[in-house]
Image: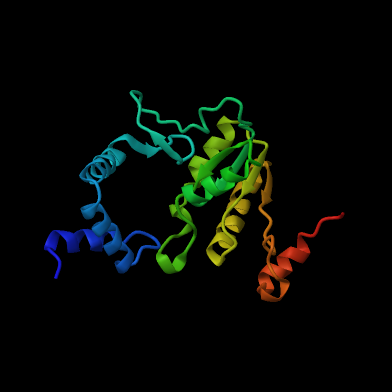
Amino acid sequence: MLPDRVRTLIQLLSRLPGVGEKTAQRYVLFVLTTDSDYGAQMGQELIALRETIGQCSWCGNLAERGSSEKMLCSICSDHKRDARLLCVVARVQDLLAIERTGAMRGRYFVLGKLLSPLEGVHPEELPVDRLKQRIGQDNVTEIILATPPSVDGEATALFLRRELEPLGVATSRIASGVPHGGELEYADPITMGRALAGRQRL
């Protein structure tokens, strides 16, 4: 019932995380029925996105392409940041989530992936050498392993701790436990166990 080009765009949008076919269809119909300038501007921005945005040369965060070969994100360019404190995350999304708290005044290193034998991601595919080089260049004194509290995230954190131990840098792991406003009866055993293990004196 829909033109081929419309169906193609619906299929493309439905590949986005959290977007199903019905939501994608609503998006496409909205673009077609709203102000034509909106669709044109969105198309131009999507094209420009790949041309102007890349990965930060230091940490792997999103950065704008400049005239020089090295691209630095706003965090790595901020001289007020404590370069001796390095937070290791799996994805840019995790970096943004930590930044929203306003509690992290150090810098980051984005792994880009987690150890996952089922998905074919093995230790040699993690950027460990680049991480060690970064630690040496910035004279890092503390590393925060902020991988997610999943099987793959835990395996990655344990692997990195073993790899970085010879460097003599203090390494810590983000705590996990019962979320604020959550009910204890709904917490799974692993989360509850970590909440008890990470308890703090009042």
Instruction: Determine whether 130 is above or below 200 in the image.
Output: above
Seen at 64% across and 33% down, the residue is 84
Which of 2/20 is in front?
Answer: 2
Location of the N terminus (image quadrant):
bottom left
Snapshot colouring: rainbow
Location of the C terminus (image quadrant):
bottom right
Residue 189 sits in quarter: bottom right
Seen at 86% across and 55% down, the residue is 201
Name the spot of residue 100 as percent of width and height, x first: 58, 44
Report the side of 169 relative to 92 (left or right).
right
Residue 170 sits in quarter: top right
Instruction: Determine whether 135 is above or below 152 in the image.
Output: above
Name the spot of residue 47 as percent of width and height, x first: 25, 41
Residue 46 sits in quarter: top left
Name the spot of residue 85 as percent of width and height, x first: 64, 37
Instruction: Determine whether 171 is above or below 179 in the image.
Output: above
Name the spot of residue 24 as percent of width and height, x first: 30, 62
Which of 106/103 is in front?
Answer: 103
Report the side of 151 relative to 38 (left or right).
right
Which of 172/177 is in front?
Answer: 177
Total number of numbered discs in the rendering: 0
Report the side of 105 relative to 58 (left or right).
right
Seen at 35% across and 24% down, the residue is 68
